[in-house]
Image (cartoon, grey):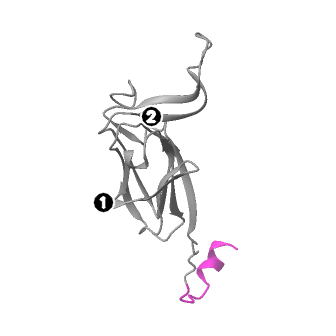
Amino acid sequence: MNRRKLLGLPLLGLIYTPMAIATAINITVSHLSPTINYFPSRSGESASTWNVTYTRPQDEPNIGAIGDGPSSHYTTFTGASASLGFVGTAVYVYGYTNGSDSDVSLSIGGQKLDTRNEDGLLGWKKGLKDQWWDLAVNVTGGGGAGIQIITFTTEFGAKG
């Protein structure tokens, strides 16, 4: 259609607006991600800060790898914490404790997460309002705690 014919079309008063359908998607963040903030630091001795720990430490030196198998950020330091900010409607924290479940406190926006130290799931919260949240993982006991991944659910394609 050329320009003259296009300009000659009558205005119908209709505007086509494509509709975006919101889809819930899960985003998984590795404990190695720089988006997780570790306090007092992300690397050091596990008795005084967080430490990257592997399930199968490297036995022979100079192989080029520092560890083997699944890894986590681990600490026995009471008072250590980790945090992650995200926009979403649910969050799941996977990791472990070597002491009791009370060695770790999990909260989001001042609300405690539901907890169950089973199948690697330390805690979760569902049914959140779709907005910005700050997740806090606080080490409250010296038995040892590790973080492996954090998964949050967010709405993709939601109305803006």
Quadrant position of the N terminus in the picture: bottom right
Task: State which region is magenta.
Answer: 1-14
Nearer the observer: mark 1 or 2; the answer is: 2
Residue at 55% from the left image edge and 47% from the top image edge: 120
The answer to whether the residues at label 1 and label 2 have Cβ atoms under 8 Å apart is no
Decide whether the magenta segment is chiefly helix, strand or loop. Answer: loop
Residue at 41% from the left image edge and 42% from the top image edge: 36
Residue at 50% from the left image edge and 29% from the top image edge: 53
x, y (%) of residue 83?
A: 37, 46
- Residue 83 visible? The answer is no
- Residue 85 visible? The answer is yes
Amino acid on which disc 2 is placed: Tyr
Residue at 43% from the left image edge and 49% from the top image edge: 101
x, y (%) of residue 144?
A: 42, 36
* Residue located beneath label 1 in the image: 110
Q: Is residue 123 left or right of residue 134?
A: right
* Residue located beneath label 2 in the image: 74
Q: Is residue 26 magenta?
A: no
